[in-house]
Amino acid sequence: MRVPPGSHAYTSAAELNAPLRGKLICCSQVPPATAPSANGDCSDFYAGGVAVYSGLLWSTPCRDLPVLLAQPRSLPVIVTYRPNWEGGQYAGEDEPRFEALLLAMELGAEYVDVEFKVADKFMKYLSGKKPQNCKLIISAYDYKTTPSVHELLNLVAQIRATGADIVKIETTAADIVDTSRMFQVLAHCHEKQVPIIGLVRKEHGFISRIICAKYGGYLTFASLENGKESTTEQPTVADLINKYKIRQIGPDTKVFGIIGNPVSHSKSPIVQNQAFRSVGFDAVFLPFLSDDLVQFLYTFSAPDYAGFR
């Protein structure tokens, strides 16, 4: 039985239902003035393969939201109004921010993203006023570590208990093997039909942006172009679509890669992924930034991790 890396207890990705294949690629943190609904031009978003974009509110939500959510709107929107204590720019009280997020729901936002730390408070503010067609993403962040699988699954349960439609967890990698814990959580949640976005930050966590598709992640985040990343390890939409063919990655996809430190400069992913596609081989070739080869090989020893160089 194939299992996620580092796991001996969870169902194989190959035994799960349909993963991210053909689903959502999110273009991160699009300011309202440059959103497709603002200028009527979705060509860059469509050409890149974006299926949803994250509208980032700053200081004037009452002015920005009607622009961001103007109809007709060709792409779904995730509305985010992040406070400064969670990496955003908003420095005020919660209630005005909640008011803006409720307005986004009323204006037809498909998704609204709220921090787990204030989720209960936000749900009390809503008092049942959330429209049925708006999905609530509740997000939790760990900027220092990636906790154990047990701790992450407990966090998933806590987030679900708030009333979240979609669980979102972002952790931080000290080493590439930390990503394996997130993959186990993704696979477990997908088996239980719990929609989850699970990603790992920093360069050691880069592979999570791609392999999440193998384990049933709800979506992944990318920038529309270089220089507009919301986090340093974030790939571009073009790389996800063209270099890594993320829409073709599924539970049976074999994973190959080049191990090194540094490794981001390697051209091997371009060459090898083109070769895989030319012969119709269901595989992806990734750069693996590893500080400990022995630990890496032990962790990523499942049969789906088919070869390294």
Image (spheres, helix red, strand yellow):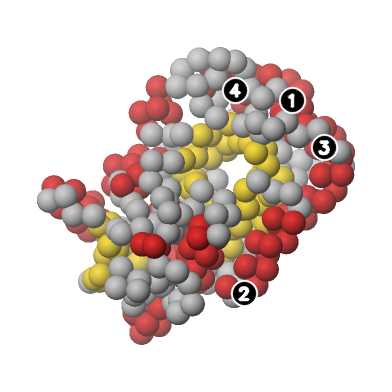
**Type of the residue with mark 1:** Glu
Residue that numbered label 3 is attached to: 128
Comparing 128 with 206, the one in front is: 128
How many numbered circles does the render carry? Answer: 4
State the residue lying farthest toward the left: 279
What percent of the width, then of the height, locates residue 34?
55, 24
Q: Earlier in the sequence, mark 2 or mark 3?
A: 3
Residue that numbered label 1 is attached to: 106
How much space separates mark 3 and mark 4, taking CA atoms? 31 Å
How much space separates mark 3 and mark 1, taking CA atoms? 13 Å
Give the residue at x 65% y 38%. Answer: 135
Q: Earlier in the sequence, mark 4 or mark 1?
A: 4
Image quadrant holding the N terminus, namely bottom left
State the residue lying farthest toward the bottom: 294
**Type of the residue with mark 3:** Gly
Q: Earlier in the sequence, mark 1 or mark 2?
A: 1
The mark closer to the camera, 3 or 1, is: 3
How much space separates mark 2 and mark 3, taking CA atoms? 31 Å
Graded by Cα atoms within 10 Å as few (under 14), some (14 to 19) or many (20 or more), the crowding at tag 1 reads few
**Residue 59 in view:** no
Give the residue at x 57% y 73%. Answer: 149
Q: Are marks 1 and 2 in contact (CB under 8 Å)?
A: no
What percent of the width, then of the height, locates residue 4?
42, 70
Q: Earlier in the sequence, mark 3 or mark 4?
A: 4
Q: Are marks 2 and 3 in contact (CB under 8 Å)?
A: no
Residue that numbered label 2 is attached to: 150
Any mark on residue 255, and which? none
Q: Is residue 38 above or below residue 84?
A: above
Q: Quadrant of residue 301?
A: bottom left
